[in-house]
Amino acid sequence: MSANLLKPNMRSQLQVFVMPNLYGDILTDEAAQIQGGVGTAGSANTGDHYAMFEAIHGSAPRMIARGMGDYANPESILRAAVMLLRHIGLPEKADKLDAAITATAIHAPITGTKEGNTCQGFGDALVKALQ
């Protein structure tokens, strides 16, 4: 499966993966790297009665420990919010947020270093993109 993720024509045919949590965690991290890194991917766990949406990378505790919390990328939790909006039947709002996140990631990217944008700067740019 990991090898197939590296083949663009193969991965474009894949839509759903069903697997135990550990394997899912590994493959989603690999897939996130293809699109820009784990800081750019949201996650959804859905069932018959409940759903949970989260950042794929968690809360970036290593960045906080190094004093780099201001440079943590909020994109993954925002991508999870896009999935949440779609899940609750608000596709237009999801599309608008998705487009704003993409535009912001291009024009005000966060690199996870002091040379990149801060979370605050990303947020400010996102709010402008949503207006």
Image (cartoon, rainbow, N blue to C red):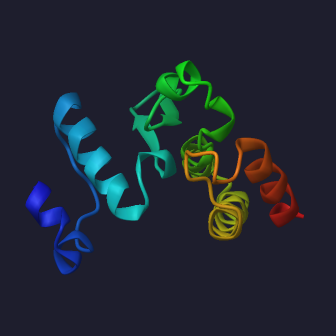
Total numbered labels? 0
Residue 14's image quarter? bottom left
Q: Position of residue 112 (x, y in %)?
A: 55, 45
Q: Quadrant of the N terminus?
A: bottom left
Residue at figure coordinates x 34%, y 55% from the top left: 33
Q: Position of residue 81 (x, y in %)?
A: 62, 44
Q: Residue furthest front?
A: 115
Left or right: 28 in relation to 66: left
User: Is residue 72 positioned above or below 115 on the image?
Assistant: above
Q: Position of residue 18 (x, y in %)?
A: 20, 43
Return the residue nearer the eye: 120 or 57: 120
User: Is residue 7 positioned above or below 35 on the image?
Assistant: below
Q: Quadrant of the C terminus?
A: bottom right
Residue at figure coordinates x 81%, y 59% from the top left: 125
Residue 110 visible to an observer of this rendering: yes
Q: Position of residue 115 (x, y in %)?
A: 63, 53
Residue 20 visible to an observer of this rendering: no
Residue 8's image quarter? bottom left
Left or right: 71 in relation to 13: right
Residue at figure coordinates x 58%, y 23% from the top left: 64
Left or right: 29 in relation to 68: left
Q: Residue furthest bottom?
A: 9
User: Is residue 70 positioned above or below 12 on the image?
Assistant: above
Return the residue nearer the eye: 90 or 115: 115
User: Is residue 29 positioned above or below 70 on the image?
Assistant: below
Return the residue nearer the eye: 87 or 74: 74
Residue at figure coordinates x 13%, y 55% from the top left: 2
